[in-house]
Amino acid sequence: PWKPWSEAMTAASAYTGGGLSGWHLPSKDELSAMKAQRDIVGASVDRYWSSSQISRALAWGPWFLSGYAPANFSTYLTSSVRPVRAF
């Protein structure tokens, strides 16, 4: 689902996929690792939010499908949410 950054943070931490807790919005480094392995982890949309903020109004998000360089997006725009968790 596409959400503004603050809603993405809340949605990721509330996620209970697989009956598990401890999910969070990935950092920019976690998203970069996922992008590097996107053929394995899959990607259904081009842009996902990270938890890495540049400023109050900007958060980092890579382009997964189009190949564009990572960008800083306004936290008021919408992007997709892809929760991750440590295991």
Image: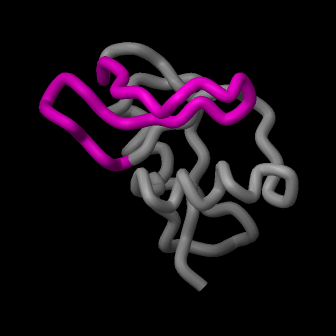
For residue 13, say whether it is visible. Answer: no
Relative depth, front residue between 70 and 15: 70
Instruction: Tell me the residue at 63%/74% (across/down).
Output: 20
Q: Position of residue 19 (x, y in %)?
A: 70, 71
Residue lying farthest left?
Answer: 56
Q: How many marks?
A: 0
Q: Residue at x 57, y 62 (%)?
A: 84
| Residue 45 as seen in the image, left or right of residue 59 | right
Q: Residue at x 61, y 62 (%)?
A: 16
Camera-side residue of 17 and 49: 49
Q: Quadrant of the C terminus?
A: bottom right
Determine whether, in the image, residue 28 is placed left or right of residue 44. Answer: left
Residue 67 to residue 84: above or below: above
Figure colour scheme: one colour
Q: Nearer the viewer, residue 46 or 83?
A: 46
Quadrant of image for the N terminus = top right
Q: Residue at x 37, y 36 (%)?
A: 60
Residue 68 painted magenta: yes
* Left or right: residue 4 compared with residue 81: left
Give the side of residue 3 with respect to residue 64, left or right.
Answer: left
Which stretch appears magenta? 51-75
Vertical comparison of 76 with 87: above or below:
above
